Amino acid sequence: MSGRCSFTNEEGQRCSETGNLEFDHVDGFARAPVHRADRIRLLCHAHNQHAAERMYGRAFMERARASADAFKTGAGSPSG
Ligand SMILES: [Zn+2]
C-alpha cells in the first residue's frame, strides 16, 4: 500500500510520513460509524492520535489510556 499522511499544518506544509499510516474517520468513528471512502483520510499514527485528542478531548484519551494500563497491569489485585 502506498500513501502519505494527509495532515497539513497551519503553514500549509503537509506531513511527509509514509509509514505507520492509519485510516481516520473525518466525522469520528464513534459519531458516524459509516465506512465511506470520502469520509476517511490517511494519517500517520502520531497525527491520528493528535486528531483523536482534538476531537474527543485530551481528558477522554487519557482516561482511555489509563483504563488500558489498568487492564494490562491487572486490576484484580487483592484488597488490603
Ligand atoms: Zn503525519
Image (cartoon, grey):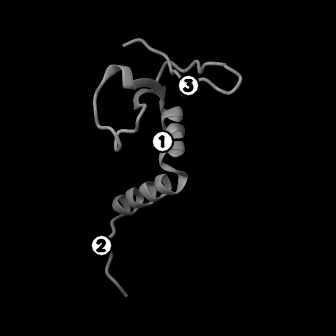
User: Does 5 appear above or below 31?
Assistant: above
Q: Position of residue 55 (x, y in %)?
A: 49, 43
Q: Amino acid at mark 2?
A: Gly
Residue of label 1: 52
Kindly identify which numbered label has been placed on residue 76.
2
Does 45 sit left or right of 23 as displayed?
right
The residue to which callout 3 is attached is: 7
Question: Is residue 35 left or right of 23 when viewed as pictured?
Answer: left
Q: At x 35% / y 43%, what residue is drawn? A: 31
Q: Amino acid at mark 3?
A: Phe
* In this view, 76 is above or below 25: below
Where is residue 26 drawn, in percent x and y? 43, 31
Callout 3: CB less than 8 Å from ligand 1: yes
Given residues 65 and 73, the one toward you in this image is 65
Residue 29, given in percent of the width and then of the height, sits at 35, 39
The alpha-carbon separation of the residues under discs 2 and 3 comes to 41 Å
C-alpha gap between disc 1 and disc 2? 30 Å
Which circle's residue, 2 or 3, is located before the other in the chain?
3
Residue sitting at x 33%, y 65%:
74
Q: Position of residue 49 (x, y in %)?
A: 50, 39
- Badge 1 vs badge 3, beta-carbon distance below 8 Å: no
Residue at 44% x, 54% y is 65
Q: Using the numbered discs, state the Cα–Cα distance from disc 1 to disc 3 in whole angstroms.
A: 13 Å
Work out which quarter of the rendered image holds the N terminus and state it: top left
Mark 3 is surrounded, within 10 Å at the Cα level, by few (under 14), some (14 to 19) or many (20 or more) other residues, namely some
Looking at the image, residue 57 sits to the left or right of residue 9; the answer is left
